């Protein structure tokens, strides 16, 4: 069960442990009744329905509705910075996506055009890697050589994840 305490006129989430720590000489039943909490300026915090269909859900404001306190939620789509680290595909998926987009034959030429040191590392990853990460040095290094934008690479990875 969640609770809220009004501090300086602002509702803040408050735990049963905080209530007990702040009142060490009081014996509380668990869960405490709503009536017993009022004496300490603490109230039961009801939960709005958790929004579905969003990548990221965060706690919103705490609202008083007809004398009851409610935790609201805010849902939103993930930003590229949040979802890119999670984009990982097998090398099979990557090659199939590149093939579908007519880019597979361009990869070897793009790797060959990289500076020494970077070229060898990219070649090893391309030939022997089992997975490819969206933010890997291989992908980041090949992106400008292939003339692809961040969004185009994201779309390529999304395609690859579906294969």
Image (cartoon, grey):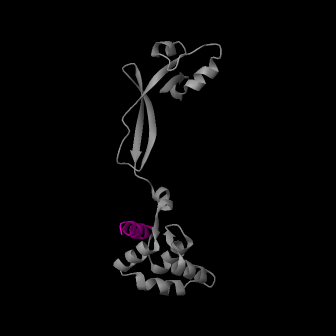
Confirm whether residue 9 shows in the render. Answer: no
- The residue under the point 59% across, 25% down is 17
Left-right relation of 51 to 13 = left
Give the image quarter of residue 50.
top left
63 up-or-down from 27: above or below:
below
What secondary structure predominates along the stretch shown in magenta?
helix
Residue occupying image coordinates x 54% and y 79%: 128
Q: Is residue 88 above or below residue 10?
A: below
Q: Would you say residue 93 is visible in this rendering?
A: yes
Residue occupying image coordinates x 62% and y 85%: 116
Q: Is residue 57 above or below residue 67?
A: below
Residue at image location 65% in from the left, 17% down from the top: 24
Tell me which segment is drawn in magenta.
Answer: 150-163
Where residue 141 sits in the image (x, y, percent)? 54, 75
Horizontal and vertical percent for residue 110?
49, 84
Q: From the viewer's side, name the closer residue of 154 and 47.
A: 47
Q: Is residue 141 above or below residue 46?
A: below
In the rendered image, residue 60, in percent from the top left (x then y), is placed at: 44, 37
Horizontal side, residue 7 vs residue 65: left or right: right
């Amino acid at each position: 069960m969640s609770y809220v305490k009004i501090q300086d006129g602002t509702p803040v989430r408050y735990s049963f442990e905080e209530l007990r720590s702040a009142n060490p000489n009081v014996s509380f039943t668990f869960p405490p009744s709503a009536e017993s909490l009022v004496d300490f300026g603490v109230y039961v915090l009801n939960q709005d329905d958790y929004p579905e269909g969003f990548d990221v859900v965060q706690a919103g404001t705490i609202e008083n509705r007809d004398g009851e306190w409610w935790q609201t939620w805010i849902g939103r789509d993930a930003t590229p910075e949040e979802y890119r680290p999670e984009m990982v595909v097998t090398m099979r998926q990557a090659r199939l996506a590149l093939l579908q987009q007519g880019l597979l034959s361009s990869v070897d030429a793009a790797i060959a055009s990289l500076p020494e040191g970077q070229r060898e590392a990219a070649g090893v990853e391309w030939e022997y890697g089992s997975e490819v990460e969206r933010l890997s040095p291989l992908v980041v290094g090949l992106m400008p050589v292939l003339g692809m934008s961040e969004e185009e690479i994201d779309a390529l990875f999304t395609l690859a994840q579906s294969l």
